[in-house]
């Protein structure tokens, strides 16, 4: 009985979450609109818009026609550095968690651990 | 009305994917299915950013002819694409670490069902 | 887990296709300038070509081309190349990761272009090595049973 009550709470939470998100998405500007604040040349505070600056100056600064690589490696190179550190950390975590020599016999282990404890006490 | 629908339908599909991912994380009992739900959630967020970066009648952000004048309205916004490249690889790393933890949990408790796992953990604490 | 029998057709086709996938991955890394591509995409393709061999052959044959103890050192080498490029820019008088100060070409925009290429090679190497290393870690238990 407790299980069924928890199931109803879970499903209703999911539906409330979906309804809230759909209500929030009604306030977004339409996709691809050229007059929304993201796509203009100037931002709200009258500074140059980042995306428009990158599009206009990418070839002149880096001599590469691919704007995405120029942003990834030159303008925002610091973020890519942090991201590579994240990949390396994940690889080292998996290495440390999983690569161990499996011990064959559990009884021998307990005897070894007890002998070591006695030796360290003396 | 029809323009409102055309401007927003992509967001609604992405929100349905978000709900499917959250359903997998909350309601399923198996731990592997929860990790799969997490992965679906991450992919939905990536799709949301990329769907919101388009412009009407604009092309891919790769210059075809670099000697003529560049108009910013002719190329789609390249900034979310760059950030989502990072997000995809971080998603892969997170899934890898999650599966490593699941392997260690199975070796220790011999089950991957959530209710069974909680029962065995509380039995071990009671000893 | 029971050892599965290796199908000779699958093994043969995987051995034939894998060098082409590796070549395409190298192409995607080095043409990150001119077409969609770059470090992350090419690194994933390279990792796919190595994992295909491991899936289609027995565990002994899969370790011949890329031994599993090479995974984490190569990943560290890739991150070291990235940090090294940034610190080299410090050495030659600029700020960290400002490629205009590396003495690789005459014009400033060409120097940035070569800096981007070096950094993408580092990223591709790191992503390939770490993805193969995570795959090997998840299969570690099979080699001991």
Image (cartoon, rainbow, N blue to C red):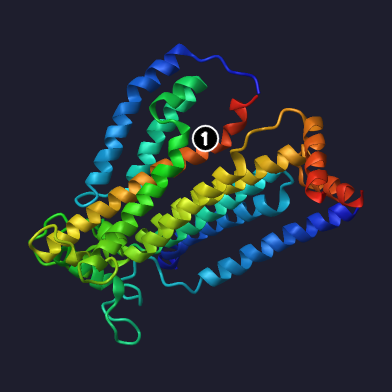
Query: Looking at the image, is A18 positioned above or below residue C131?
Result: below
- The residue depicted at 44 percent of the width and 18 percent of the height is C10
Q: Position of residue B54 (x, y in %)?
A: 34, 62
Query: Looking at the image, is C144 positioned above or below residue C120?
Result: above
Q: Where is residue C65 in the image (x, y as percent from the top left)?
A: 38, 27
Q: In which quarter of the image is residue C106?
A: bottom left
Q: Position of residue A94 (x, y in %)?
A: 56, 45
Instruction: Give the side of residue A16 with respect to residue C115, left or right.
Output: right
Query: Looking at the image, is B43 positioned above or below residue C17?
Result: below
Q: Is mark 1 on a helix, strand or loop?
A: helix
Outermost residue on the top side: it is C8
Outermost residue on the front side: it is A122
Q: Where is residue A30 in the image (x, y as percent from the top left)?
A: 40, 69
- Frontmost residue, B47 versus A105: A105
* Residue underneath mark 1: C136
Query: Looking at the image, is B107 positioned above or below residue A53?
Result: above
Question: Which quadrant is home to the C terminus of chain C?
Answer: top right
Instruction: Give the side of residue A73 with respect to residue C100, left or right.
Output: right
- Frontmost residue, B25 versus C88: C88
Is residue A42 visible from the viewing direction of this image? yes
- The residue depicted at 44 percent of the width and 57 percent of the height is A85
- The residue depicted at 57 percent of the width and 57 percent of the height is B18
- The residue depicted at 29 percent of the width and 70 percent of the height is A51
Question: Which quadrant is home to the N terminus of chain C?
Answer: top right
Label 1 neighbour load within 10 Å: few <14, some 14-19, many 20+: many
Q: In which quarter of the image is residue A59?
A: bottom left
């Amino acid at each position: 009985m407790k299980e069924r009550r928890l199931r109803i709470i879970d499903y209703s939470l999911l539906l409330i979450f979906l309804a809230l998100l759909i209500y929030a998405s009604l306030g977004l500007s339409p996709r691809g609109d050229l007059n929304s604040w993201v796509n203009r040349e100037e931002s709200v505070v009258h500074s140059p818009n980042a995306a428009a600056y990158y599009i206009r100056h990418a070839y002149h600064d880096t001599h590469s026609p691919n704007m995405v690589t120029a942003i990834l490696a030159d303008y925002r190179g610091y973020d890519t550095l942090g991201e590579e550190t994240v990949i390396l950390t994940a690889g080292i975590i998996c290495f440390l968690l999983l690569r161990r020599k499996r011990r064959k016999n559990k009884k021998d282990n307990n005897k070894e651990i007890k002998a070591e404890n006695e030796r360290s006490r003396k | 009305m029809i323009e409102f629908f055309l401007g927003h339908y992509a967001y609604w599909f992405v929100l349905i994917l978000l709900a499917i991912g959250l359903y997998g994380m909350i309601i399923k009992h198996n731990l592997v299915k929860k990790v799969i739900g997490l992965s679906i959630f991450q992919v939905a967020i990536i799709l949301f950013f990329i769907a919101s970066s388009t412009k009407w009648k604009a092309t891919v952000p790769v210059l075809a002819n670099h000697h003529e004048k560049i108009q910013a309205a002719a190329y789609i916004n390249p900034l979310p694409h760059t950030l989502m490249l990072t997000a995809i690889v971080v998603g892969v790393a997170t899934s890898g670490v999650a599966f490593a933890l699941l392997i260690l949990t199975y070796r220790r408790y011999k089950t991957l069902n959530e209710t069974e796992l909680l029962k065995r953990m509380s039995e071990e604490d009671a000893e | 887990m029971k050892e599965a029998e290796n199908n000779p057709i699958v093994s043969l086709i995987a051995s034939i296709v894998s060098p082409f996938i590796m070549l395409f991955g190298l192409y995607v890394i080095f043409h990150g300038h001119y077409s969609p591509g770059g470090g992350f995409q090419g690194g994933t393709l390279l990792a796919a070509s190595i994992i295909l061999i491991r899936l289609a052959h027995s565990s002994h044959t899969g370790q011949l081309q890329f031994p599993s103890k090479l995974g984490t050192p190569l990943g560290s080498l890739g991150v070291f190349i990235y940090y090294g490029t940034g610190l080299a820019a410090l050495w030659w008088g600029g700020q960290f990761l400002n490629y205009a100060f590396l003495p690789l070409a005459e014009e400033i925009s060409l120097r940035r272009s070569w800096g981007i290429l070096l950094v993408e090679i580092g990223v591709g190497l790191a992503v390939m090595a770490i993805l193969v290393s995570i795959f090997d870690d998840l299969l570690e238990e099979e080699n001991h049973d």
